[in-house]
Image: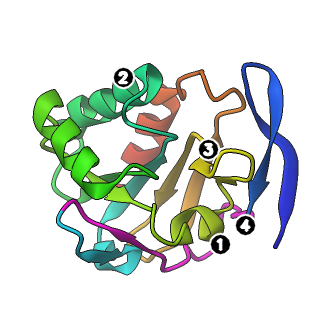
Amino acid sequence: MAERLGATTFKGNPLTLLGHEIKVGDQAPDVEALGNDLSPVKLSAYRGKTVIVSTVPSLDTPVCDTETRRFNKEAAGLGADVAILTVSMDLPFAQGRWCGAAGIDKVKTLSDHRDAEFGNGFGVLIKELRLLARAIFIIDKLGVVRYIQLVKEMTSEPNYDEVITAVKKLA
């Protein structure tokens, strides 16, 4: 399995990312994660939509909480042809509970806890923590990756304006 040391850091300490590094222009891997009801969800279920995929370490942390709330707010201005997914290693039940408490109604949360298929498929599984790195992928309606933002420092938020500008060009 491919490893990338130092692709991201946590409080300045380098971390190792596992899995295939995705590049802009690649076909998005058709990975599977779990919905909040434990149903399997394939990424290909979103073909025909522009998809923002936000991978986060855990919704129960301040930065991940802020990021997911921000994308939920931004979703209102993006239209029905844009889907926003937040993928983490949190258990599906915990994700559902968090979404209910946070009022998240536009972002769909998916759990990668069972097989880490998403983390490995997109190259964002952190070897040392078995969590997902903070990254944003934008996938077009045909399933092609059109934008990637791997946040260098895990405790930092992504550049939201850059993400929204990129998705509006595709939508």
Q: Tag 3, which secondary structure?
A: loop
What colouring style does the render use? rainbow
Residue 87 lies, in percent from the top left, at 42, 53
Residue drawn at the location 28% of the way across and 28% of the way down: 69
Quadrant housing the C terminus: bottom left
- What amino acid is at disc 2? Thr
Residue 15: image x %, image y %? 79, 40
- The Cα–Cα distance between marks 3 and 4, rounded to whole angstroms, is 12 Å
Residue under numbered circle 4: 19
| Of residues 143 and 95, the one drawn nearer to the viewer in this rendering | 95
N-term mark: 2 or 1:
1
Q: Is residue 52 above or below residue 74?
A: below
The 10 Å Cα crowd at callout 2, few under 14, some 14 to 19, many 20 or more, is few
What mark, if any, has residue 66 been given in the picture? 2
Q: Quadrant of residue 100?
A: top left
Do tag 3 and tag 4 residues touch (Cβ < 8 Å)? no
